[in-house]
Amino acid sequence: MSIRFTRKVRDILSHINTYGFITNKQCALIYYKGRKQPYLQAQTKLKLLYDNGVVKRIEYKLNKEYIYTLENKDIGDHRMYAMNLYALLYNKYKVHYFKLEESWSLCKKRNDAHFVVENDEGCQVGMLCEIDLYHKTSQKKLDMLYESGEVQEWYKTSYDIDDYYPSILIINNTGLTQLKSIQYDVVAVNFDFEGLESFL
Protein backbone atom coordinates (compact mmCIF):
# COMPACT_ATOMS: atom_id res chain seq x y z
CA MET A 1 0.00 0.00 0.00
CA SER A 2 1.36 3.43 -0.91
CA ILE A 3 1.73 6.23 1.62
CA ARG A 4 0.01 9.61 1.51
CA PHE A 5 2.07 12.41 2.98
CA THR A 6 -0.67 13.89 5.14
CA ARG A 7 0.04 16.49 7.81
CA LYS A 8 0.24 13.75 10.46
CA VAL A 9 2.77 11.80 8.40
CA ARG A 10 4.81 14.96 7.88
CA ASP A 11 4.66 15.67 11.63
CA ILE A 12 5.89 12.16 12.44
CA LEU A 13 8.74 12.45 9.95
CA SER A 14 9.65 15.88 11.34
CA HIS A 15 9.76 14.34 14.82
CA ILE A 16 12.09 11.58 13.61
CA ASN A 17 14.27 14.14 11.88
CA THR A 18 14.44 16.30 15.03
CA TYR A 19 14.93 13.62 17.68
CA GLY A 20 16.43 10.81 15.61
CA PHE A 21 13.76 8.17 16.11
CA ILE A 22 10.29 7.28 17.31
CA THR A 23 8.74 4.09 18.72
CA ASN A 24 5.18 2.80 18.34
CA LYS A 25 4.38 3.72 21.95
CA GLN A 26 5.85 7.22 21.65
CA CYS A 27 4.00 7.80 18.39
CA ALA A 28 0.71 6.66 19.94
CA LEU A 29 1.10 8.96 22.94
CA ILE A 30 2.10 12.00 20.88
CA TYR A 31 0.34 11.77 17.53
CA TYR A 32 -2.69 9.61 18.29
CA LYS A 33 -3.63 10.79 21.78
CA GLY A 34 -7.35 10.77 22.36
CA ARG A 35 -7.95 8.35 19.49
CA LYS A 36 -9.47 4.90 19.75
CA GLN A 37 -6.73 2.26 19.69
CA PRO A 38 -3.88 4.78 19.44
CA TYR A 39 -1.15 2.14 19.63
CA LEU A 40 -2.65 0.16 16.74
CA GLN A 41 -3.02 3.31 14.62
CA ALA A 42 0.56 4.35 15.31
CA GLN A 43 1.85 0.85 14.58
CA THR A 44 -0.03 0.73 11.29
CA LYS A 45 1.23 4.14 10.15
CA LEU A 46 4.86 3.49 11.08
CA LYS A 47 4.84 0.07 9.39
CA LEU A 48 3.43 1.69 6.26
CA LEU A 49 6.28 4.23 6.30
CA TYR A 50 8.74 1.36 6.71
CA ASP A 51 7.17 -0.80 4.01
CA ASN A 52 7.39 2.12 1.57
CA GLY A 53 11.06 2.69 2.33
CA VAL A 54 10.50 6.11 3.89
CA VAL A 55 12.03 5.12 7.25
CA LYS A 56 14.27 2.36 8.52
CA ARG A 57 13.46 0.03 11.41
CA ILE A 58 15.68 -1.51 14.06
CA GLU A 59 15.05 -3.38 17.30
CA TYR A 60 15.85 -1.67 20.59
CA LYS A 61 18.25 -3.94 22.42
CA LEU A 62 16.62 -3.78 25.86
CA ASN A 63 13.06 -4.78 25.00
CA LYS A 64 13.06 -5.65 21.26
CA GLU A 65 10.68 -2.75 20.59
CA TYR A 66 10.83 -1.41 17.04
CA ILE A 67 12.54 1.94 16.59
CA TYR A 68 11.83 3.89 13.41
CA THR A 69 14.68 6.08 12.18
CA LEU A 70 16.08 7.69 9.07
CA GLU A 71 19.42 5.96 9.64
CA ASN A 72 20.32 2.52 10.94
CA LYS A 73 21.99 3.79 14.09
CA ASP A 74 21.73 2.48 17.64
CA ILE A 75 19.77 4.67 20.02
CA GLY A 76 21.37 5.38 23.39
CA ASP A 77 19.48 4.29 26.50
CA HIS A 78 19.47 7.80 28.00
CA ARG A 79 17.93 9.17 24.81
CA MET A 80 15.30 6.44 24.76
CA TYR A 81 14.15 7.12 28.33
CA ALA A 82 14.20 10.87 27.73
CA MET A 83 11.95 10.50 24.69
CA ASN A 84 9.64 8.14 26.60
CA LEU A 85 9.35 10.94 29.16
CA TYR A 86 8.62 13.47 26.41
CA ALA A 87 5.87 11.27 24.96
CA LEU A 88 4.24 10.86 28.37
CA LEU A 89 4.38 14.60 29.07
CA TYR A 90 3.00 15.45 25.63
CA ASN A 91 0.12 13.05 26.15
CA LYS A 92 -0.91 14.50 29.52
CA TYR A 93 0.15 18.15 29.55
CA LYS A 94 0.80 21.14 27.35
CA VAL A 95 4.54 21.07 26.68
CA HIS A 96 6.00 24.57 26.40
CA TYR A 97 9.63 23.50 26.16
CA PHE A 98 11.52 20.24 25.87
CA LYS A 99 15.18 19.81 25.07
CA LEU A 100 17.41 16.77 25.14
CA GLU A 101 20.87 17.20 26.62
CA GLU A 102 20.52 20.80 27.76
CA SER A 103 24.02 22.23 28.17
CA TRP A 104 24.99 25.04 30.55
CA SER A 105 28.17 26.81 29.54
CA LEU A 106 29.08 28.64 32.76
CA CYS A 107 29.35 25.53 34.93
CA LYS A 108 30.10 23.22 31.98
CA LYS A 109 27.35 20.79 32.96
CA ARG A 110 24.60 19.10 31.01
CA ASN A 111 21.21 17.67 31.92
CA ASP A 112 19.77 14.66 30.12
CA ALA A 113 16.62 16.69 29.47
CA HIS A 114 14.98 19.99 30.42
CA PHE A 115 11.27 20.66 30.13
CA VAL A 116 8.58 23.17 30.98
CA VAL A 117 4.95 22.02 31.02
CA GLU A 118 1.61 23.51 32.02
CA ASN A 119 0.13 21.43 34.81
CA ASP A 120 -3.54 20.71 35.52
CA GLU A 121 -3.87 23.94 37.52
CA GLY A 122 -2.62 26.02 34.58
CA CYS A 123 0.79 26.74 36.16
CA GLN A 124 4.03 26.37 34.23
CA VAL A 125 6.45 23.96 35.88
CA GLY A 126 10.06 23.38 34.87
CA MET A 127 12.29 20.39 35.58
CA LEU A 128 15.89 19.44 34.90
CA CYS A 129 16.14 15.68 34.35
CA GLU A 130 18.94 13.29 35.21
CA ILE A 131 18.60 9.70 34.01
CA ASP A 132 20.68 7.49 36.30
CA LEU A 133 21.18 4.32 34.29
CA TYR A 134 24.83 3.44 34.73
CA HIS A 135 25.99 5.98 37.30
CA LYS A 136 24.38 8.21 39.89
CA THR A 137 24.10 11.95 39.54
CA SER A 138 26.40 13.69 42.02
CA GLN A 139 25.40 16.31 44.55
CA LYS A 140 28.39 18.35 43.40
CA LYS A 141 27.05 18.56 39.85
CA LEU A 142 23.65 19.75 41.02
CA ASP A 143 25.13 22.33 43.40
CA MET A 144 27.47 23.69 40.72
CA LEU A 145 24.54 24.05 38.34
CA TYR A 146 22.49 25.96 40.91
CA GLU A 147 25.36 28.16 42.04
CA SER A 148 26.26 29.20 38.49
CA GLY A 149 22.99 31.13 38.25
CA GLU A 150 22.71 30.20 34.59
CA VAL A 151 19.46 28.26 34.95
CA GLN A 152 17.85 31.10 36.88
CA GLU A 153 18.93 33.52 34.15
CA TRP A 154 17.44 31.23 31.48
CA TYR A 155 14.05 31.37 33.21
CA LYS A 156 14.32 35.12 33.64
CA THR A 157 15.08 35.56 29.94
CA SER A 158 12.59 32.96 28.69
CA TYR A 159 9.66 33.51 31.07
CA ASP A 160 10.42 36.79 32.86
CA ILE A 161 10.47 35.03 36.24
CA ASP A 162 12.87 36.24 38.92
CA ASP A 163 14.86 33.71 40.98
CA TYR A 164 13.03 30.65 39.64
CA TYR A 165 14.87 27.36 39.85
CA PRO A 166 13.22 24.18 38.55
CA SER A 167 13.07 20.93 40.44
CA ILE A 168 15.66 18.29 39.68
CA LEU A 169 14.02 15.08 38.46
CA ILE A 170 16.09 11.95 39.04
CA ILE A 171 14.96 8.98 36.95
CA ASN A 172 16.35 5.65 38.13
CA ASN A 173 15.49 2.03 38.83
CA THR A 174 14.10 2.56 42.34
CA GLY A 175 12.36 5.91 42.08
CA LEU A 176 14.29 7.04 45.17
CA THR A 177 17.20 9.41 45.71
CA GLN A 178 19.38 10.56 48.57
CA LEU A 179 20.23 13.84 46.86
CA LYS A 180 18.80 16.90 48.56
CA SER A 181 19.26 20.62 48.96
CA ILE A 182 17.75 23.47 50.92
CA GLN A 183 18.08 25.66 47.82
CA TYR A 184 16.19 23.52 45.30
CA ASP A 185 13.91 20.47 45.20
CA VAL A 186 15.13 17.04 44.18
CA VAL A 187 12.50 14.42 43.34
CA ALA A 188 12.74 10.94 41.85
CA VAL A 189 10.66 8.53 39.78
CA ASN A 190 11.35 5.09 38.34
CA PHE A 191 11.78 4.28 34.66
CA ASP A 192 7.99 3.98 34.28
CA PHE A 193 7.68 7.56 35.65
CA GLU A 194 5.27 6.43 38.37
CA GLY A 195 4.13 9.34 40.54
CA LEU A 196 5.49 12.05 38.24
CA GLU A 197 2.16 13.87 38.18
CA SER A 198 2.42 14.54 41.93
CA PHE A 199 5.50 16.71 41.30
CA LEU A 200 3.98 18.80 38.51
Image (cartoon, helix red, strand yellow):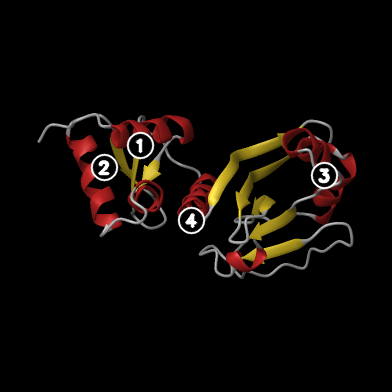
Q: How many residues crowd around disc 1 within 10 Å: few (fewer than 14), some, or many (20 or more)? A: many
Q: CA distance from mark 4 to mark 3?
A: 26 Å
Q: Cβ–Cβ below 8 Å for labels 1 and 2?
A: yes
Drawn side of residue 1 relative to residue 40, left or right: left
Drawn side of residue 87 relative to residue 99, left or right: left
Under circle 1, the secondary element is helix
Most extreme residue toward the front, as rendered? 122
From what the image shows, is residue 175 above or below residue 56? below
Q: How many residues crowd around disc 4 within 10 Å: few (fewer than 14), some, or many (20 or more)? A: some
Q: CA distance from mark 2 to mark 4?
A: 19 Å
The N terminus: image quadrant: top left
Q: Earlier in the sequence, mark 3 or mark 2?
A: 2
Circle 4: residue type: Leu
Q: Earlier in the sequence, mark 4 or mark 3?
A: 4
Residue tagged by mark 3?
145
Q: Nearer the viewer, mark 1 or mark 2?
A: 1
Which disc is residue 73 wearing?
none
Residue tagged by mark 4?
88
Please give the name of the residue rendered at 38% of the width and 58% of the height, measured from the top-left corner: 63
Residue tagged by mark 1?
12
Q: Earlier in the sequence, mark 2 or mark 4?
A: 2
From what the image shows, is residue 179 above or below residue 29? below
Residue 89 percent across, percent down from the top left:
52, 53
Q: Nearer the viewer, mark 4 or mark 3?
A: 4
Tell me which corner region of the image, top left, top right, bottom left or bottom right, holds residue 16: top left
Q: How many residues crowd around disc 3 within 10 Å: few (fewer than 14), some, or many (20 or more)? A: many
Q: Nearer the viewer, mark 2 or mark 4?
A: 4
Residue 47 percent across, percent down from the top left:
22, 43
Under circle 2, the secondary element is helix
Under circle 3, the secondary element is helix
Residue tagged by mark 2?
46
Under circle 4, the secondary element is helix
